[in-house]
């Protein structure tokens, strides 16, 4: 059985970054164990193949999770440090929609940088992880053999994208050591509709800018009507905070409807939204599509619902359609300055395996990379007994 100083479980964004940092700053023997036959499959597929690395504005307010964990982790490797790290490797991220940092060509640019930096680590691909046992050393069992290590970093991600090999093995490992976990559930995902909102299904393919209020959060971005319900960037981010109950949608943000009170144009023409949407909305709220200046006070109240539409989604599009998962190892189980389990010394959890989830827009890769750096710094500063 081969022994290592550190075994990293998972060859995705967080696992590769952790290994890269350790290789750069220590002489530890390191293995990366990955169940797929290629590393970083989710990273490669993300952002339409161009990987949304991070966001223009990054802080703990864009995450669901314990601020006492998120804030110190982001401070160690903030957005600026992430951009400088990849720029030093030759990547020149581009900004889209004034907020999202993407690779200019493809996700392969990020993967290539990380793979270059993990040279010297043993990369064990096609090793589906079955379990971990023991401590000092830990014994890792895969479908293809057993390995031992003084330290284990669990970077196995969440349960979304099962077609890319995702699983809940990280939670099972934590649970086997008595560590508290939160079950994975779909996040950054479309929302399905109650029968009352089935009128939206007829608008499949139409998009508009919208503002959604959910669980004390206000989110602005494009909304897309889909056959199964509602989607688009604003809905995906809203799904992070929605569990049950109502959300409020403003289909016409930053527009003063009062300027139309004397307008002679009919409503569907006067309001700057797709006419198909307007026709369906007016029918839903019981309004005739007539001249704006002919609306009664009660009719105006009904029209104002376009900026204050309350609806209760019935659920989500599910894990197969989710970008990421909520849930993971409970935040209170993790040391925010090392990412080590507070119960089991030598066992670390990073990336999506931890119960920290960001909004859409690069926040989850930022968390993956930041938590990996925190972990690597802690591991790199430790002394290991010579073998």
Image: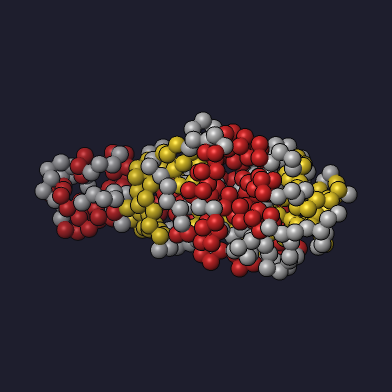
| Residue 234 shows up from this direction | yes
Residue 36 appears in which quarter of the rendering?
Answer: top right
Residue that appears at 40% across and 60% down = 217
Query: What x and y, as percent, mark residue 126?
Result: 76, 40
Residue that appears at 66% across and 40% down = 117
Residue 249 appears in which quarter of the rendering?
Answer: bottom left
Query: What x and y, as percent, mark residue 256?
Result: 20, 51
Residue that appears at 21% across and 39% down = 269
Query: What x and y, as percent, mark residue 360?
Result: 48, 48
| Residue 350 shows up from this direction | no
* Residue 247 in the image: above or below residue 143: below
Q: Residue furthest top?
A: 105
Query: What x and y, as percent, mark residue 304?
Result: 25, 55
Along the viewing direction, whichever of 128 and 8 lies nearer the viewer: 8
Quadrant of the image containing the C terminus: bottom right
Residue that appears at 55% across and 47% down = 365
* Residue 381 in the image: above or below residue 164: below
Q: Residue furthest right?
A: 1
Along the viewing direction, whichever of 141 and 58 lies nearer the viewer: 58
> Is 288 on the left or on the right of 375, as rendered?
left
> Is 379 on the left or on the right of 145, as rendered?
left
> Is 60 on the left or on the right of 25, as rendered?
left
């Amino acid at each position: 059985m081969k022994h290592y100083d550190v075994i990293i479980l998972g060859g995705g964004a967080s696992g590769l970054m952790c290994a890269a940092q350790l290789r750069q700053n220590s002489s530890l023997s390191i293995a990366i164990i990955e169940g797929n036959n290629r590393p970083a499959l989710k990273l490669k597929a993300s952002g339409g193949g161009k990987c949304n690395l991070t966001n223009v504005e990054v802080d703990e307010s864009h995450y669901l999770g314990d601020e006492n964990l998120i804030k110190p982790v982001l401070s160690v490797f903030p957005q600026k440090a992430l951009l400088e790290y990849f720029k030093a490797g030759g990547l020149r991220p581009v900004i889209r929609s004034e907020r999202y940092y993407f690779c200019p060509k493809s996700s392969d640019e990020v993967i290539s940088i990380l793979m270059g930096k993990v040279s010297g680590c043993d990369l064990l691909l096609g090793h589906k992880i079955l379990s971990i046992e023991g401590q000092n050393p830990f014994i890792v069992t895969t479908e293809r053999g057993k390995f031992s290590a003084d330290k284990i970093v669990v970077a196995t991600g969440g349960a979304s994208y099962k077609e890319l090999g995702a699983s809940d093995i990280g939670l099972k490992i934590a649970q086997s050591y008595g560590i508290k976990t939160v079950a994975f559930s779909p996040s950054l995902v479309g929302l399905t509709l109650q029968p009352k909102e089935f009128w939206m299904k007829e608008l499949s393919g139409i998009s508009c800018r919208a503002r959604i209020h959910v669980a004390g959060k206000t989110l602005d971005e494009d909304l897309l009507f889909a056959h199964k319900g509602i989607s688009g960037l604003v809905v995906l981010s809203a799904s992070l905070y929605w569990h049950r109950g109502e959300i409020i949608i403003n289909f016409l943000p930053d527009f003063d409807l009062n300027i139309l009170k004397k307008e002679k144009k009919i409503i569907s023409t006067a309001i700057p939204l797709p006419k198909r949407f307007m026709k369906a909305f007016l029918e839903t709220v019981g309004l005739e599509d007539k001249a704006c200046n002919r609306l009664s006070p009660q009719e105006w109240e009904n029209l104002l619902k376009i900026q204050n539409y309350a609806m209760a989604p019935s659920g989500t599009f599910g894990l197969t359609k989710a970008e990421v998962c909520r849930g993971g190892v409970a935040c209170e189980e993790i040391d925010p300055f090392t990412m080590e389990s507070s119960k089991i010394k030598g066992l670390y959890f990073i990336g999506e395996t931890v119960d920290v989830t960001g909004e859409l827009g690069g926040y989850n890769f930022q968390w993956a990379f930041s938590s990996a750096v925190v972990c690597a710094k802690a591991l790199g500063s430790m002394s290991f007994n010579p073998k």
